[in-house]
Image (cartoon, rainbow, N blue to C red):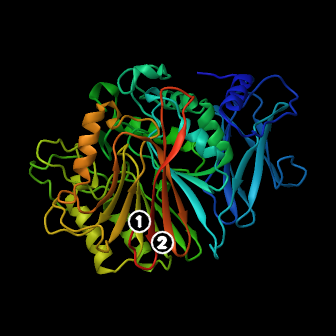
Amino acid sequence: MNISRRKFVLSAALLLPISRLTATDLKSNVNYFLQGVASGDPLQDCVIIWTRVTPTDPLKTHVKWEISTDPGFSKLIKEGQVDISAHHDYTVKVDVKGLKPGCKYHYRFLYQGTISEVGETQTLPEDLKEGDFTMAVLSCNNWEDGYFNSFRFLAQKTAVDLVLHLGDYIYEYETGAYGNPASGRINVPKHEIVTLQDYRARYAQYRTDPDLQLLHAKKPFYLIWDDHELANDAYKDGAKNHQPNEGKWSERKKAAIQAYLEWMPIRADKGSEVRRKFDIGEDISLYLMDERSSDRTQQMENDQPGFNGADRVIIGESQYNWLAKELKSSQSIWKLIGNQVMFSGYAVAEGFRLPKYNDWWLGYPAERARILDMLDREKIQNTVFLTGDHHESFVLAVHKEAQFMKYTKSHKQKPLAWELLTPSITSRNGDRRSKAEINDFEKMLQDKNINPHLVFADIKSHGYFIATINKKRFRTDYYFVDNILTNQAKEYKAATFTIDATTFGIS
């Protein structure tokens, strides 16, 4: 699916009460930058900048890039030239080094007389001093479920420093298999994506979305994958949504990872480098996990032999040792774990159906218990799980409990960790239920006799949360949109929660 430059700029202008930085000094009437620009993985002295060129003449292989401290590029501080080729789907990733900490920058690309959109990015500060660091946390944007309105609203929030995307950036399904026909949005290609070219085409389609393009142009991203960047319920050696007639899983997995690394502005050249860490002085440490491709064993039902076995893992020995060592040695006030699937879990009353949890951490009880034991034994302070995948909004205290999936401890008791689940951008949740069913389920969830560890639950809304972090507190603001079936939606703030750095209590 291609979108013209004029249509893209016009649609963004109609939807947003803010100005957009556009490349006006065009020497060519051809737009080679149909998927926009993006940046990611900022450190204190460097950042990745990204674009993709749609070449009409593949022999023209050079792309120029520029970075400046002003949007007019009168103060050019870095520039260079890179090659593009079909080998990497004509994508461009540049690790711009030698930058200053805590600074904002503007960047652009030039190809065959055409200038790309101008992107905005920034480096990490050396520390928080007495200020805030603000990070939007989101996941699960399915094309066929609706419009990415939340991206547009988030792009307007100038106080937000960066975006953390926790996975399910694309969905692999064929048209009609997983989505809402009422949206009128159709996948490209229409069949389930299996090959390298399939995955590339699906990313190319998603990146024509004007709201997603806008957010990438306005904010740097940290990204990790979940299962749908590969296939539903993926694990190391297969996936629920991979069948024998779709070829070898190893080949499909390799293709999916290659396309992801080509299309995402992350500092990784191979799948094993998706696991990574970012620090802001001794204030924040952010750990981004790979809970799909490296060591995860196949999902099982809780009544199957071996369900509780220590050999059943999500992250595996190497990644566990890395995380445990990092947490034990960290001097940071806040230890944040970028986590794909729900860690804490919740209970339901008799007569209500518990969502299938075998793909969550609850489906791997031995490794989950090992992490809880480590947090308890080592007295790790101020750990917060930032979680996607579930499509619904939850705030939960993480405790050690005597019995598996029996929640007895209150959120008012100091937990080992907090878990904050971001809703989906569009992917289906409880929104297909009747209002009465939604109200009954949410009321049941918040019954303290059933879930004493639960602070907040919303099963039907779409959006994201913003974490505003300083030395004293971690504030979470949930933002929801009122409609995903039209691009004329409105946004509202739904809830706010604050975790105190000293007491680790929530209010």
Label 2 with label 1: CB-CB less than 8 Å = yes
Name the residue carrying label 2: 334
Asked if residue 263 shows in the view, the reply is no
Q: Is residue 111 left or right of residue 181?
A: right
Q: CA distance from mark 2 to mark 1?
A: 8 Å
**Secondary structure of the residue carrying numbered label 2:** strand
Query: What kind of residue is marked 2?
Result: Trp
Q: Is residue 68 left or right of residue 273?
A: right
**66 and 406: which is toward the camera:** 406
Q: Residue lying farthest right? A: 74
Q: Position of residue 365 (x, y in %)?
A: 20, 59
Name the residue carrying label 1: 384
Q: Is residue 60 left or right of residue 183?
A: right
| Mark before the other along the chain sequence, 2 or 1 | 2
In the picture, residue 38 is in which quadrant? top right
In the picture, residue 123 is in which quadrant? bottom right
Query: What kind of residue is marked 1?
Result: Val
Q: Position of residue 287 (x, y in %)?
A: 47, 63
